[in-house]
Image: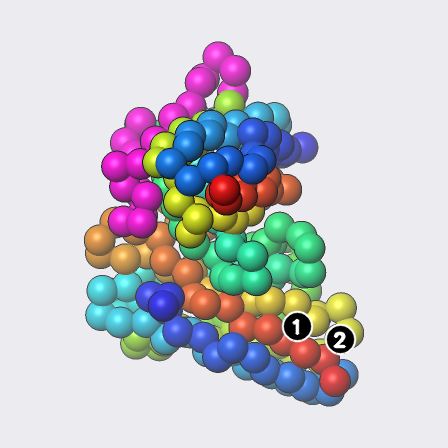
């Protein structure tokens, strides 16, 4: 069981907007630690998508955005494209001095 | 260009030992937070261990006392010594580099598969 909770799957049609939630607790997200998001395409290593709750690394399209409030965070993807079909993971830090991941969310583009 | 190349994975019997290596190029391992993250077949990501630039090390409870993270600055290489391996350690092990903070992984290796089975 992962420390951070994500929905197992989400789906959307091309062009639509989808959101993926990430719920933590007072010992991680709620303690003020930043949330980061990764995209993992099938058969490849994860790729950093969002860092520090809302920041996009160079090269990541602005269709991807992140937010954080309280003990939760969200990843939003607008203008959904076929190549967005992947697994998405949230990550944060825990007061036990450990990095923690969510269980992952599989995005299906219908 | 930053590159991380893992090696050392393979099939090992329960109770056995294995050492993973991660050769880095394009940056200095001793100047970054360096981690190992694993992914069991069909499962999510699990943080395993981190070594700080100052040398401090931390481990997930699931591997504490069995795994040891280290680095060789002269070879610019990160290691993960894995002892007393269990079936549940079967996973792809990714080497990860974090120049921004101890948590955010900017660079990932391609991964090396460790299979623990008799």
The subunit carrying tag 1 is A
Viewed as shown, does residue B41 lie left or right of B63? right
Residue B38: x percent and y percent? 48, 48
- Residue at image location 49% in from the left, 48% down from the top: B90
Q: Which residue ends up furthest to the front in the rendered image? A: B118
Q: Secondary structure at mark 1?
A: loop
The residue at the point 68 percent across, 78 percent down is A108
Do we see residue B96 in this rendering? no
Q: Which residue is mark 2?
A: A81
- Identified at 46% across, 30% down, the residue is B18
Res A27 label: none
Magenta region, mostly helix, strand or loop? loop
Displayed quadrant of residue B35: top left
Cα gap from disc 1 to disc 2, whole angstroms = 10 Å
Q: Which residues are magenta?
A: B54-76
Residue A59, position as x, y percentages in the image: 68, 55
Residue corresponding to mark 1: A63
């Amino acid at each position: 069981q992962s420390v951070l909770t994500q929905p197992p799957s989400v789906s959307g049609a091309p062009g639509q907007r989808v959101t993926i939630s990430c719920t933590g607790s007072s010992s991680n997200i709620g303690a003020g630690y930043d949330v980061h998001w990764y995209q993992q395409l099938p058969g490849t290593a994860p790729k950093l998508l969002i860092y520090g709750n809302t920041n996009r690394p160079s090269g990541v399209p602005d269709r991807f955005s992140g937010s954080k409030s309280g003990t939760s965070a969200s990843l939003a993807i607008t203008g959904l494209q076929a190549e967005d079909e992947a697994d998405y993971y949230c990550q944060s830090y825990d007061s036990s001095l450990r990095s923690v991941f969510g269980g992952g969310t599989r995005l299906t583009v219908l | 260009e930053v590159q991380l190349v893992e090696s050392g994975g393979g099939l090992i019997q329960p109770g056995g030992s294995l050492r993973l290596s991660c050769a880095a190029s394009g940056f200095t391992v001793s100047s970054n937070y360096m981690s190992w993250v694993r992914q069991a077949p069909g499962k999510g990501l699990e943080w395993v261990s981190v070594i700080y630039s100052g040398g401090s090390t931390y481990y997930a409870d699931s591997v504490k006392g069995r795994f040891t993270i280290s680095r060789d600055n002269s070879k610019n290489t990160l290691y993960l010594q894995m002892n007393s391996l269990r079936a549940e350690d079967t996973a792809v092990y990714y080497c990860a580099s974090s120049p921004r903070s101890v948590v955010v992984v900017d660079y990932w290796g391609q991964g090396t598969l460790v299979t623990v089975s008799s």
